[in-house]
Structure formats: structure tokens, C-alpha cells
Amino acid sequence: MAARGHAIAEGPGGDHRSGAVDSGPETVLLCGAYALDDSRAHPALAELPDVVHLPARVGQHSPLRAAIDLLGHELDTDERSGAIAPLLEVLLLFMVRAWHQAHPADTGWVAALRDPAVHAALQAIHAEPGAPWTVQSLAAHATVSRSVFAQRFTGTLGLGPLTYLTWWRMTCAAKLLRETDLLVRVVAERSGYTSEYAFAKAFKREYGVAPGRFRTHRRPAAA
């Protein structure tokens, strides 16, 4: 999804260390940047405020502290290993998780993960977006009644199960169009559409352009 992307960082090894020259503790700034897909924001990121502040209180956010320590160690070494980019991915995950743990909500995508029934349905949709899911089959997968499932899913996420299913299918389809050379017909089939026309119509409604045009304009330029 959109949360994933190539990450870069500058730390002590990049001459970004600063502090008082004469006295006082040294301050180290660790800066990172992520290249995200601006066409589709990941729900967990969309629920964040513009600025996320996580106070460094002792005993809190242990995984986040460990990730920062590991990343700082890698940036301090002379050899830049391939661990930096994966560590930045982990760092982002722990930052998002820490903020949501400190600010729990009753609704939203992260809140849905705490509801066993909704979580089970989301796992099923994410694992097999092309499956012929219905509200009834998703409710059976979540082991609750259809009415209870629909109410809990919609009440937590703010949209119905099939609306979310379409959203996820279009997200997966966009990824396939950007990153593979699969025919649009094949992308449609993998996205749960037996008709290429119906898929193209749904895709254009979601992104404002036809699948072929989206692929042309969104695919990264060759290195």
C-alpha cells in the first residue's frame, strides 16, 4: 500500500550532527524521508495528525527506541549496509503504532484491527481481493451473523464491507498496473472482475483515469 516506499536517511555519518561548541549536551538529529504513493493514502497514515510528537519518556515505546538505536548504529558505521532502508520501514511502523496506542479511537482503520470480527474480515479481503466475497461470506468468515457483522464493520470503518472491498481491489489493481506488465484483462481478473469493461469503469470512477492511462503516467521511469 501507500505506506510502503523507498526510504533514505541522514544521520551522524552524513554530517548532520549538531550541538553546542563550548558546553552542554550534544544534540543529534536523525532525519528520514519516505517516497509514498500520493494517489492512495494508507488508512493508518491518513488517521495521523499533520505533526506526530512522541515524548521520550522512560519506559515507553521500547520497540521504537530499539529501532532508533539500531538505525543510529548503522548510520554511525563507515560501511553503509543494506539494513538502513528496512530499519526505516520498521521505524515508521513503530512510530505509527506508538501514536495510535497513545491515542486510541473507537472508530477508524486501526480501531477495526482491535475488533476480532472486523479484523478477520479485513484479513480475508486483503489475502484474497479477487475472491467473490459477499457480506454473508465475510460474516461467516468472521463467525458472526450477517447483521451484526455489517453493523460492526460499518460502525468502525465508516463504510460498508463491499465498499471497502472495492477500495482494496482498486488499491491492489493500481499496484499491479504500476509494477507489472500484466494485461489489463489479467489485472481485472485478479481484482475480482470477470468483465474488463466493468473493471475499467470501476477503476476510472476511483482514480479518474482509465487503467491504461494510469499505468502510463504512474509507472516509475526506467533507471
Image (tube, rainbow, N blue to C red):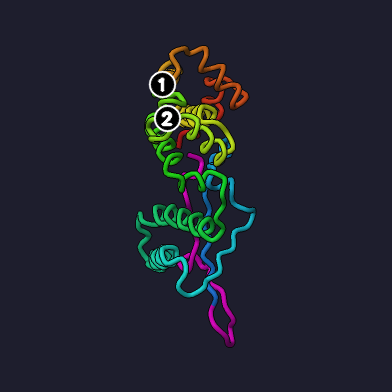
| Proximity of marks 1 and 2: CB atoms separated by less than 8 Å | no
What numbered label is drawn on residue 95?
Answer: none
70 vs 53, left or right, is: left
The magenta stretch is 1-26
| Residue 45, visible in the rendered structure | yes
In this picture, is 56 found above or below 20? Answer: above
Residue picked out by circle 1: 132
In this rendering, the answer to whether 114 lies above or below 58 is: above
Q: Amino acid at mark 1?
A: Pro
Reply yes or no: does residue 177 show up in magenta: no
What residue do we see at 40% from left, 56% from top? 87
Which quadrant of the figure has residue 25? bottom right
- What is the residue that sits farthest to the bottom in this orientation? 23
Q: Residue at x 51, y 54 (%)?
A: 96
Residue 217: percent from the left, percent from the top?
A: 56, 28
Q: Front-most of 136 and 208?
A: 136
For mark 2, what is the residue?
138
